[in-house]
Image: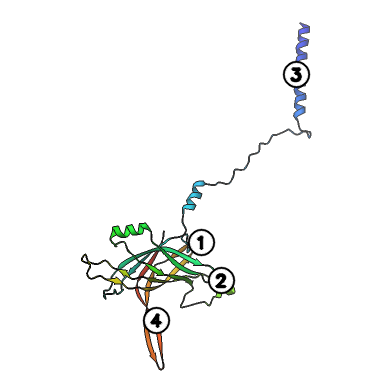
Amino acid sequence: MDNIAMRGWATILVVLCATILKAKAFAPSNGHPCIQRVGIAPAPPFTSLSMTETALDVKKPTLTDATTWRLRLLLNDVTTTKGRKLDGQLFVVEGKFIEEEGYEPPQGFFRPIVSQTMDEEAEESGGRGGMLLEVTNSPWKLSEDPDDRKDGLWIWGLFAEPLYPFMLLQMETKELALPSSSDGENVDSIPPLKLYAQINHIRNKDEGSVELQTANLNVRVLEQIQLPGATVDLFEEEAVGQVSFQPL
């Protein structure tokens, strides 16, 4: 019995010594308890593919060929070739504002386009949604107030950049035949027009988007004044309707 007891105590001592030696082997050299730290990598910045796709789908209206504009011209006081006055006749033009490089203030031309959708809409509505108006020439130019120019003070550093709160637009049109009676009699038309508009131009500097507000349409009436030895031509603008702008 004594031999068995001695062997049991010997086994306990061996196990205890092995445990102590193993603990010392894994302890840090400075004697402090070893605490294992688990590193957690920071999460990557949140990006949403759906938000990116949505942002790409949003079209910002600009004065470039990236944006197609629909112009609605409501003419109220235009005389036809047969002397009839138009009363609330709506016309539609679609196109792009193209800027010509190298000019300050910015300027360019409006390039009209005729889409198949416009033709189909005009036929289905019988002209009630707006007759197509053919534009032959249409220059535009951003401007300060033409009646109160600041003489380009922004050039001298008084402003961070020119604001150009107005767009000066000119539109020259072709003669347009008006719907006539079924027997082909009393055919009437609108003579070629030269229309002018001073449009409120608002640009969002942060987004780069542009807003063009509804403006009056004018024609210039020539008035000749006879002076001693000379004749002076004076042009007076006369309102004939309105034009509105819709980016597509």
Q: What is the distance, in whole Å, between disc 4 and disc 2 at their CAs?
A: 34 Å
Instruction: Report x, y in % for residue 128.
Output: 29, 62
Judge depth for marks 1 and 4 and give the one in front: 4
Q: At label 1, which amino acid type do we have?
A: Gly
Residue linked to disc 2: 159
Q: What is the distance, in whole Å, between disc 1 and disc 2 at their CAs?
A: 18 Å
Whether the residues at callouts 3 and 4 have beta carbons within 8 Å, the answer is: no
Q: Which circle's residue, 3 or 4, is located before the other in the chain? A: 3
Q: At label 3, which amino acid type do we have?
A: Val
Q: Which quadrant of the figure has residue 117?
A: bottom left
Q: Which circle's residue, 1 or 2, is located before the other in the chain? A: 2
Q: Which circle's residue, 3 or 1, is located before the other in the chain? A: 3
Q: Residues within 10 Å of mark 1 (few under 14, many from 20)?
A: few
Judge depth for marks 3 and 1 and give the one in front: 1
Q: At label 2, which amino acid type do we have?
A: Phe
Residue linked to disc 4: 235
Q: Secondary structure at mark 2?
A: loop
Q: Nearer the viewer, residue 215 or 85?
A: 85
